[in-house]
Image: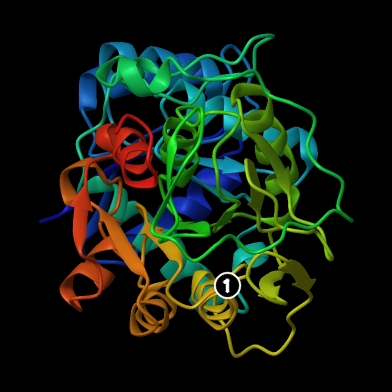
């Protein structure tokens, strides 16, 4: 099957460059181009491409507004091109909120070691997102003054109505002693499943929307720390964690070296670095390290973070692999499972790209496939809410 693409950018040079790269792959055909957002909307309606590549800053109509109109009138998977700055990160997250499927840095060399790798990255990303039908409205939202559960929270009112308001996150120096080795411990608010001591999540393409949908359903008193690896450039993870923190009742922060893992806090691995867990269960700390070895493709890497969790927490980990390209997380999840941990995978139908979840599912590592709409409530049930 040939993937038809509409290329949108106000730079004629960049449009030619993207077109040449894409059409060097026989599976891709560029069927049109546009130099502003308004033209993009009209071309999307008339050409009905399989994928659109979209710049953000353009005259007449910017890329974010164009994405919003396209997703309303002619839904189509859209790949955004972004600058690697804090402002670029914010704009890209706004584009994902509007309905874009994924993004890449506009300077291709920022995501590749050489031209051949950069070309393959762009081609692979376009082909990957072309395989999924576009939705009319994204679930990614802007932070508001009061964090609210997403639409799917109505599926489990008995669990989710227990939400408490977010409290200030614990200090980095604080620690928590290991829990008693009983299977379940009853408290005034919930029955905590002591089979786990940490929730670990790995994701890539489609992850920002998936993470928000899940995390906004968790209460402020969620009983475990949450360790998250999202493939994302270094300039983006701070802005993304801040956005999530403004939306969620749990605390969400970009991980820093030396952070002490605390319940009810989600730690997002910084882009461009590796995040490892050290110490012992109940008193674990994060180590954030530069990685210039060239041996690991992804920075951050789900495999490396999950592998470190297996050494500290053993089988007391609930690991979740969400939507994403490739197979990062498979070997780390395998190490966790070998220690007795539980691994879930997002189901194919709800993934933007069924690469990472498929890798753990086809290897027999995951014990359960869960749709994105059900993942939040499934996690709450698993940890003891609503019992």
Q: Nearer the viewer, residue 321 or 9?
A: 321
Q: Residue at x 26, y 23 (%)?
A: 75
The image shows residue 275, relative to residue 31, as above or below, that is below
Horizontally, residue 330 falls left or right of residue 289, namely: left
- Closer to the camera in the image, 304 or 113: 304
Above or below 238: residue 63: above
Q: Is residue 155 above or below residue 333?
A: above
The residue indicated by pointer 1 is 305
Q: Position of residue 99 (x, y in %)?
A: 41, 26
Horizontal arrangement in the rendering, residue 302 relative to residue 246 (left or right): left
* Visible residue check, residue 21: no
Q: Secondary structure at mark 1?
A: helix
- The part of the image, by quadrant, that contains residue 124 is bottom left
Left or right side of 48 for 173: right
> Where residue 144 sits in the image (x, y, percent)?
65, 12
Q: Give the residue furthest to the left.
A: 1
């Amino acid at each position: 099957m040939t993937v038809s693409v509409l290329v949108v950018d106000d730079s004629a040079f960049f449009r030619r460059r993207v077109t040449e790269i894409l059409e060097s792959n026989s599976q891709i055909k560029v069927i049109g181009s546009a130099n502003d957002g308004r033209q993009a909307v009209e071309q999307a309606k008339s050409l009905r491409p399989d994928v659109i590549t979209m710049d953000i800053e353009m005259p007449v109509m910017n890329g974010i507004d164009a994405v919003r109109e396209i997703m309303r009138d002619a839904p189509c998977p859209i790949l955004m091109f972004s600058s690697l700055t804090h402002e670029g990160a914010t704009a890209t997250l706004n584009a994902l909120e509007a309905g874009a499927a994924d993004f890449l840095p506009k300077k291709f060399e920022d995501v590749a070691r050489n031209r051949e790798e950069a070309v393959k990255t762009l081609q692979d990303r376009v082909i990957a997102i072309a395989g999924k039908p576009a939705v009319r409205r994204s679930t990614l939202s802007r932070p508001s003054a009061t964090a609210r559960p997403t639409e799917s929270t109505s599926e489990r009112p008995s669990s989710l109505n227990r939400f408490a308001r977010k409290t200030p996150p614990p200090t980095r120096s604080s620690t928590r002693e290991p829990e008693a080795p009983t299977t379940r411990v009853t408290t005034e608010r919930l029955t905590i499943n002591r089979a786990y001591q940490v929730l670990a999540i790995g994701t890539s393409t489609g992850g920002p929307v998936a993470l928000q949908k899940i995390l906004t359903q968790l209460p402020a008193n969620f009983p475990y720390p949450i360790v998250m690896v999202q493939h994302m450039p270094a300039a983006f993870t701070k802005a993304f964690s801040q956005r999530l923190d403004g939306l969620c009742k749990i605390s969400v922060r970009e991980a820093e070296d030396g952070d002490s893992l605390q319940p009810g806090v989600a730690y997002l691995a910084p882009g461009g670095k590796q995040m490892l867990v050290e110490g012992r269960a109940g008193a674990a700390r994060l180590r954030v390290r530069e990685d210039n070895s060239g041996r690991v493709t992804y920075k951050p890497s789900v495999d490396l973070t999950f592998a470190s969790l297996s050494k500290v927490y053993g089988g007391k980990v609930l690991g979740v692999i969400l939507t994403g390209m490739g197979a990062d997380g498979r070997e780390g999840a395998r190490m966790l499972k070998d220690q007795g941990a539980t691994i879930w995978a997002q189901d194919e139908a709800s993934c933007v790209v069924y690469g990472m979840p498929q890798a753990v599912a086809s290897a027999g590592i995951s014990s359960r496939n869960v749709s994105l709409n059900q993942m939040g409530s499934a996690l709450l049930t698993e940890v003891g809410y609503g019992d």
